Structure formats: structure tokens, C-alpha cells
Image: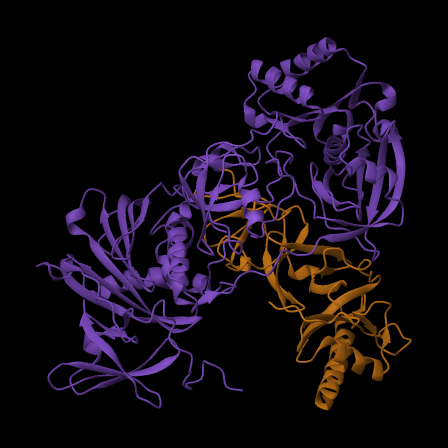
Amino acid sequence: MQLHNESRSVFAANGWFPVELSRRVPQGEVVQSTLHGQELALWRSVAGTVQAWENRCPHRSVRLTLGFVADDQLVCRYHGWRYGSDGRCTGVPSTPALAPPPAACVRAYMCRETDGVVWASLALAPRGYPPGLPGLAACRSFTLDTAADRFADALGAAGFESGGHPAVWQEPSGDTEAATLLLQPMDAHTTGVHLFVAAPLPAARRLAAAQRMKALFAKELSHA
Amino acid sequence: MLEDKDTTVIDRPVDPAIANDWFAIGQSSDAAPGQTLRRRLMQRDIEVCRDGSGTLAARVVDVDAAPCAARDHCGCIFVCLGAAPKPLFALPDFDTPGRRFVYMGAIGVHTGGLRVVENFLDMAHFPFVHSHILGTEEATEVREYEVELDERQELWARGCKFVQPMASAASEGQADIDYVYRVVNPFSPLLYKAPAGHAGHTDIIFLFVQPTEEDDCTVHFAISLFDDTHSAGEITAFQQTILGQDKPILESHVYKRLPLDARIEVPSRADAGSSAYRRWLRQIGLRWGVEPMAAAAPAPLMVEVADKRSVADGVAAFTLRSPVGGPLPPMTPGAHLDVHLPGGLIRQYSLCDGPADDGCYTIAVKREAASRGGSAAMHDVVQPGDLLHISLPKNNFALDRSAKRSLLIAGGIGITPLLSMARHLAARGDDFHLHYFCRSAAHAAFRTELDDELAGRWTLHAGFSPEATRDTVERLLGSGDAATHSYTCGPLPLMQLVESAGAAAGWPRKRLHFEYFKLAGPVEAGGMPFELTLARSGRTVQVPADLSIVDVLRSIDVAIDTNCEQGVCGTCLCTVIDGSPEHRDQYLSAGEKATNMQMLPCVSRSRSQTLVLDL
């Protein structure tokens, strides 16, 4: 749960980073993610809004990803404490006659959803806004045992171009089948890589893009 | 690099708070005569052997092979690492004729042992973790019970009751079950459990924790009972089901060591047992297996003044934005900010923003003739381009989720939170009307915004006499069904008028919402002197009649965060460990005050001669 001091890196903790593909956070569900060593509970209300919270119930520090979504609130599995979309506790079943303690408030991180990607930032006031990915669709996601800034350097050396955001890298090819990679700095040694390709693209060519990227990862990681 | 978890010998001494306590390491029959057991206890490898005559001996496996104490007791083997073992707990019931002892196993649980004990003392999780066995979601309330640390330094919780669909292997259906918890040392709890009114036939459940590492343990699970119809296997299967449900929860604690710092976790009144347990662990000075103190509160947010404009006579609105070009944290209608002003003052201002104003905050400040410097600094000193420190938005004036209709009443500069509420309600398509009372039309702030965004949904009441204001407020509150909530912010006479008119028209207090920035009526200063003890440092000081607790804490250099110091904002909220506070604030609800679990030391005092705070 330690934040790493990466303030000089483009992967500084005050930026926006992808934390999950939208389709993997279905309505009414809660899933786990990691950003800069901070474990997150991502959940989507029935109305469709995504939240990125510290994965810890303020009552007894149990992971909220064990819990469930009910009535557009996230419910902790341990004692049934309920939390509304602003992170504040809205109900304590063991003391139904009392107002919930005001201090019982989950740390809610800034979260935005664009073009099929859930973006989050650990900063109170993050730098800028998450980028859009018009015309692209998610293809595969990978987890690599390397730091995001090192992997970004390797992509640069392999001819990838920055897509205008430190987390977005484009394959060096003018054609429409070029891959776009979104980097998720999970912790100091782990990077999530989300592969996007032009939409729509036939399955065989999506598979080809995924195999091309896997070959690239194997080559870059073997150098490390 | 080797870590403590490796079987290397550590040179740190056993925590003196628990060095002379006894820990179960197995059942007595685990060690047959001539047999040696190798176990791990508090990061040490130990060997326990039974000689031909049945006598136990134990030693720590290190260079000195230091001997330690081992005994058979209540069907288990207990080991003490310290040089001066405390007496073993007394349990005469264990030998009562007709009782059976069933050792139900040693179960590894990958969390700190103190977490396991606290979970064992907790009834509030029954309906959620042991649903349809030890509790149901139809009966979640934990009724009040008594907690006491007795003269033998054992923690007891008595009078605990819970409705259980299936209390034991022998259960014949849902029943109200009586529980008595007894913690004989920090890692060794027992439970006496019987159907209500059958105290003579209690099951005694043992949950003896063998802490192996600070964040790992083995649980020795046993029962003494009168059941002679069920096999040991049946009894064990039932209890193993319960522990099997607890295990994944216990292993999902973010902090596997128990936090004794009250700022890390937030208890409810149902947690009286665990609060007393943590208080006891603090008292004995336990460090091993305990989560370190919390980090300091996060630094406030830095914002840039993007715009400053006049929105009425003597009222300036400020737009605040992120200096790094992204959005500011989300706010909810009714929220306010603490703004740190040039010169060191902190003032609270409500946010005026609607749901569409993503990324910026808007506040409005009226120049007060009697300003103590706050509004003057905002009007005269703060300019576009300046950077200000602010808190995250806080909300003591939130919209009620259950309201079907909202009656918004603003007076003067009190328009700010109500403008935000009106904008959010309008965006949601909810039913509401805003009534805005002002000295004159020229004093009405945000006229353009109100006319553009809320046409037909707001009414200006300008230049009314006190009588006309009274008649209007009485008329507004005269109608309104049980699904209507009213929200008022404005000068004190207006708030009092709404409160009395609402009471006269039969509005329950929970449907009348008020935002106070200045305390209603003067703060009652002084009172009876009393003695204050600070639990974390053990210091005791006198609080004289004419000083507040905060005054006294400052005089002895004890840091406490305060903000309004008028009992309104809740910044100094602290946990009461012992004594009866005399609540004088407007922050805690009547229900919260009645529990006496927390208080605001900036204004509140003590009814009892001594008061112990978690400071």
C-alpha cells in the first residue's frame, strides 16, 4: 500500500492511468485493481457510474472487493456497512437506530470513463484529463513483470510513438491495424498493458495483433 | 536478505506485554510420552517434549536452547516464553461431570492473531458472514451488553444476546442465544454460549491463538459441552463450517496486524467489546502484532483562483480550479470547504456548483462589516491567479435520499449551498422550489444564474418586514407532506423562524435541515472543573472552570486539530474512553451524544469528575 516516489517520472502519481477495461466492470459488480501500489475496488452502480475506491472498509479494514453492490451502494461483506457513491457510510446494520459515524468514509479516488477504459488517479487534483481513444476497441490485456517507465522506454526504443499521454503508445505503422498500448503502472515492478486495435477488426487480425505484441514483450523483457 | 519469517533466530526480546502469558500450541494428546513437538511461537521455533512420566518440558531452539515453561491445561498444551509465568486461567467447569471435551483442530489463519480474537468477540458479523447459521439479515441489531476488565486482568463481555437460526450442532431451530465472552489473555478467548435461560448447560468454546508471526497464526479450536448424542465429527464439522466462513474475511484485512490507533478504523456502538479489547491492549503497551500509528492527515488541496466577480452588493464570487489543469475532487450539494486565507485564518464557505461544473469550485463571500479578517481578506487581498490551500469538500448539510420534494429556504449569503442543491435537483428532475429572502433585490446574489437556470422554480422575497417574513415562512411550512424535506441556510433569526414554524406545523426534526456557520446563541463558556486523562500518553491534567479542553491541551503542547472551535465543524472530534462528556456542540446528533463514544473537546466538557480521552 506504499506509494512510490515517482514524481520525476511521466508515470507520476498525479496523472491519470487506465485501471480496467469498462467491460470488465459490469453493472452492479465490484472488481479489484492496482495503481501505483494502491489496491483499488472498482464498482459500477446499477445506474452505470464507476467508482475507484481504496480497497478497504473504514470500519475493520477488510477489502471491499469481497463485498457487493446493492441499491447503488457498496456493501462490505464483513458487517454489512453500506457506502454511497461519495464514499460516505449510509448504514450500519448493527446499530440501525443511530446515524452512521461521520468518520466512516471510504477514500474515493478520481475516476473517469472514456471509450471503454476506466481511468483513475491517486491525486486529489490530477493533472489534466484522461485521453479519448476514438475508433479503437480493446483486444487483450497483459500483465508484465517490469516497471511502467522502463517498459515505456523499451517501447520508445522499439519505435513506438507516444500517443500524447504517458500511458498511451502507438505501434510504428501507418496502417489501420497498428496497435495502441495503454500502460497501467500497477506497482514498482508490475505493469498492466491493455492492447487496443482499430474497431471493427476481424478476429484473425485481432489475434495477429495480440501475437505481435506478445512477441515484442518477450523480446523486451528478455533484455531486462 | 533473510526475513523474520525464515526459521532464523531473532534477537528481539519477546514483547514484555505478553512475555509471561501462556499460549496454546496443541492438544495434550499431540505429545505422547517420549515424543517431541516442534512448533513456532512469536517468531521463535520451540520444542516441547513429554518424558516417560508424562511431564512436559520445552525450550526455544536457539543458540542458548533457553528453557521455557510448558503445562497441560483444559485438554491443551500451553507454553510460556517468559521467565515469570503468570498463573494459568481457572476453569473449574471444565471438570464438571457430564462435560465432554472435543478438540476441533489446529487451523492456520493468515492474519494477525489479535484480528482472530477480535472477530471471535464480535457479534455484528453473524448476519453477514454466518448468514442463516449464527444470524439473519432480518435481525442485525446488536443489543447493548456489559464489558469489564476484571481484577485478574481478564476481559469479560456479559449480557450479549443474538437471534440465531442454528446456534450449534444440537440446535433445533431459531433461538435467542446468550453469550458470555471471556478473554483470559490477549490471545486466548473463551465463549460461554447457551440458549436463553439455560445457563447450566453452556457450551464453552475455546479459540486459543498460537501467534506464529505478527501477521500469521494457528488457531486451536476446542469445545467443552454436554451433548452426548452428536459424534465428535459432527460437532467439529459444524464449528469448522463457522471458522471456514470467518477465514477468508480474516485473511482479507488490509492491515493484518490490529490497529490500536483510533484514527485508522471507525467503530460503532456495537463494537463495545472490541473497543474495550483494544483499550486493554493499549493499556498493557502491546507492540508485537499491532499496526503502527497512522500517518498524518493528508495535506490540504492547492487551488488557483481562476475568476473573481461581483454577484451582488458586497458579495464576491470566486471560481477555484486545479493549478495542474485537471478536475477537482467531486463535491455533493450542501458541501463546504475550509479555505486557508492569507494571514493564517481558516474560513468555511459553501460550494454553489451544480453537477455540470466539473473541474471547478465556486464560492461566494459577503463582505462582513464586523469581519474578523476573513471576508476582508477574500475581498481585498485574494485576486485571480492567487493560490489558496483548501480542504476537501465536507458535507454536514446533505440532501436526504428519501425526500420526494424539497423546500429550499435561503437568507442573504445563505443562498450558496441552496443554489448548489437547486442546480443538482433540477438536473435530476426532482420536485423543489427555492425561496430566497433578501434585504433588497440588489442584495440578491446570483440573479443571472437563478433566472437563467431555475426560471419558475425560485421566488425572491426582497425587502420583507419581520412580520411579512414570518407570515411567508409560516405559509411555506404550512403545506408540505411527509415526503417533503426543508433545507435552510441564512441569518440566525430566519433559521429560528423556520425551526419554530416547522415545529408548530408538525414537521419532525429529521425533515428540517439547517446549515449553521455561526453557532446559534453564545457558546456557554466554562463550567465545573474536572480531571482529564490522555490515554495514549497516560498524562493527567486539570481542566479549570474557565478553560476548554482544547485550551488546556494547547497549554501542555498536545497537538489537536481544531477548526471552528465553536462546536460546529467536527474537526476536533475525539473518542471517549471513560467518563461522561457534557456535550455542548451542534455537530453530533442526539443519538451520537447519547452513546458518549465521541465528543468535541473544543466546547464540550465533562459531567463526571474524571474524563479519559483517546488522545
Residue drawn 38% across and 54% down?
B130
Of residues B384 and B450, the one nearer the viewer is B384
Q: Quadrant of residue B244?
A: bottom left
Q: Quadrant of residue B228?
A: bottom left
What tint does the image give chain B? purple
Of residues B518 and B177, the one nearer the viewer is B518
Query: What is the x, y in percent for residue B222?
Result: 24, 65
Query: What is the x, y in percent for residue B353?
Result: 78, 39
Res. B220 in view: yes
Query: What is the x, y in percent for residue A217?
Result: 73, 83
Find the residue positioned furthest to the right.
Answer: A174
Of residues B197 and A176, the one nearer the viewer is B197
Residue drawn 30% across and 88% down?
B65
Instruction: Say above or below: B117 vs B303.
Output: below
Of residues B483 and B95, the one nearer the viewer is B95
Query: What is the x, y in percent for residue B247?
Result: 41, 64
Determine whether, in the image, residue B498 is placed left or right of residue B176: right
In the rendered image, what is the letter of the chain coloured orange? A
Res. A104 in view: no
Determine whether, in the image, residue B192 is placed left or right of residue B422: left
Quarter containing the N terminus of chain B: bottom right
